[in-house]
Image (cartoon, rainbow, N blue to C red):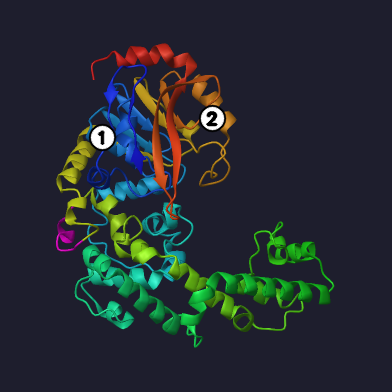
């Protein structure tokens, strides 16, 4: 993520968040969470006036609460969220993950994610709490690296054919092509258990996938016709709303999952078993996914996605001593010192950090407070527990007597933007998406905001 700076329009305070790559990697606030404000936490906190109480009503991973506490802006802190991710923050503060080293497989994830917030958020893709962190093609490689770096166990790498006692990023980068070739061959033989000529397939993957897709779609259409059914009948049978069009139409076509296919065999004329009909296509798609891993760039360092990188954010709140023997990411310099936890634990004792699990409008707000609301952004992913009523929130914010500061892209005319910051987020595809984060306050609080900013911070 690249961040460019700006000037606080109301206070005149100058904030310069331009940071080196090293600084962006090392300074971490809160715990891993989808939509975390970790990278712009200092910018957000620079707009908070000095007050007695702080309420983070949509705390998520508590990045803003953590940053505000370290900067000692308020006397008391209250982190609230209708989800449970902020409890993960408290567990980290109390050292719950000091000895956490587990490898969490796909099966472990779906078995445990509803029981352990750590697994739900730290081992899910994009920290969304829903899907597993790694694709099926990448998971064995990630496991091998985890075992090598965390347990000093190189047996899984040796099984792949990589004879090394050094699984550092530097070594993997230097031997990237060799590792990629050996991993693809191992994966095809041991995971896909394919006796196809994979080398030949790799020369024409795109064409083969396109050809197979058309053949599979025609097979499904023929079976649908023989059963005298329509796509809407399939939707009704499966209890889905429009999903069947992806099985029978060309737009966004996709073959049914194994579970759906086997269920449909009792409803449609589908004579072939799943492996026989979809095996070659599955092989080609897996090969294509592996080929798209550019020189193992997405595999080599475990940046952002590997479990200890997840723990890095947690361990920045506790002892890092057990990780000192591990070569993590680019170097151990990317891990914060023990002082971070010591400061935070001290703050918790002295300044009363409390957490709650309520709707934002159920939290009692004391006088002399600043309320920060990182609401679900309008027209983006829905709230973790369902749809979010933005109109209801706007009315609530306008009724508040204490200062409300809101993170959003855009807000209605009853709110004014006090500052903005442009950031560039790198996606998995390698492309960048630019977004402008903004801070808003209710228009009827403009004078209150100016008055509070004039207080000595």
Q: Nearer the viewer, residue 347 or 433?
A: 433
Mark 2 residue crowding within 10 angstroms, few (<14) / some (14–19) / many (20+): some
Query: Is residue 148 inside the magenta stretch?
Result: no
Residue at the front extreme of this rendering: 203
The answer to whether residue 415 of the structure is visible from this angle is yes
Left or right: 22, with 127 as reference point: left
Q: Which residue is mark 1?
A: 69
Residue 295, percent from left and from top: 35, 66
Please determine whether, in this image, residue 102 is positioned above or below residue 420: below
Residue 179, percent from left and from top: 31, 74
Which quadrant, please, contains the N terminus?
top left
For the record, the magenta segment spans: 319-327
Look at the numbered disc 1 and give the secondary structure of its residue. Answer: helix
Please determine whether, in this image, residue 303 is positioned above or below residue 180: above
Quadrant in the rendering for residue 457: top left
Which numbered disc covers residue 393?
2
């Amino acid at each position: 993520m690249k961040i460019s700076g700006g000037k606080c329009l109301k206070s005149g305070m100058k904030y310069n968040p331009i940071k080196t790559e090293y600084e962006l990697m090392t300074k971490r606030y809160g715990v891993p969470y989808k939509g975390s404000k970790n990278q712009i936490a200092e910018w957000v906190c620079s707009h908070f006036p000095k007050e007695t109480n702080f309420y983070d009503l949509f705390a998520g991973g508590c990045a803003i609460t953590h940053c505000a506490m370290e900067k000692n802006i308020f006397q008391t802190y209250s982190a609230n969220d209708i989800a449970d991710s902020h409890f993960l923050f408290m567990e980290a503060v109390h050292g719950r993950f000091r000895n956490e080293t587990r490898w969490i497989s796909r099966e472990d994830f779906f078995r445990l994610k509803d029981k352990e917030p750590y697994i739900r958020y730290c081992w899910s893709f994009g920290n969304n709490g829903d899907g597993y962190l790694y694709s099926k093609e990448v998971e064995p490689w990630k496991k091998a690296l985890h075992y090598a770096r965390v347990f000093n166990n190189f047996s899984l790498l040796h099984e792949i054919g990589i004879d090394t006692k050094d699984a550092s990023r530097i070594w993997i980068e230097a031997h990237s092509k060799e590792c990629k070739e050996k991993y693809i061959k191992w994966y095809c033989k041991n995971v896909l258990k394919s006796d196809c000529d994979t080398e030949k397939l790799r020369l024409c993957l795109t064409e083969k996938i396109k050809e197979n897709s058309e053949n599979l779609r025609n097979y499904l259409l023929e079976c649908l016709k023989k059963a005298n059914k329509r796509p809407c009948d399939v939707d009704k049978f499966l209890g889905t709303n429009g999903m069947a069009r992806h099985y029978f139409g060309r737009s966004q076509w996709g073959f049914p999952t194994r579970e759906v296919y086997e269920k449909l065999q009792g409803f449609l004329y589908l004579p072939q078993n799943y492996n026989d009909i979809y095996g070659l296509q599955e092989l080609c798609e897996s090969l294509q996914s592996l080929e798209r891993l550019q020189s193992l760039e997405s595999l080599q360092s475990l940046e952002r996605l590997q479990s200890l990188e997840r723990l890095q954010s947690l361990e920045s709140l506790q002892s890092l001593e057990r990780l000192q023997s591990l070569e993590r990411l680019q170097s151990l310099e990317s891990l914060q010192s023990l002082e971070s936890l010591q400061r935070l634990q001290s703050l918790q004792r002295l300044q009363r950090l409390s957490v709650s699990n309520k709707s934002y409008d159920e939290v009692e707000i004391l006088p002399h407070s600043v309320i920060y609301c990182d609401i679900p952004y309008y027209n983006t992913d829905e709230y973790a527990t369902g749809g979010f009523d933005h109109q209801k929130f706007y009315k609530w914010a306008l009724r508040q007597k204490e200062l409300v500061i809101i993170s959003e892209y855009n807000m209605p005319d009853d709110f004014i933007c006090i500052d903005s910051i442009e950031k560039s987020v790198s996606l998995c595809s390698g492309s960048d998406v630019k977004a402008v984060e903004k801070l808003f306050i209710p228009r009827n609080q403009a004078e209150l905001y100016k008055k509070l900013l004039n207080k000595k911070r």
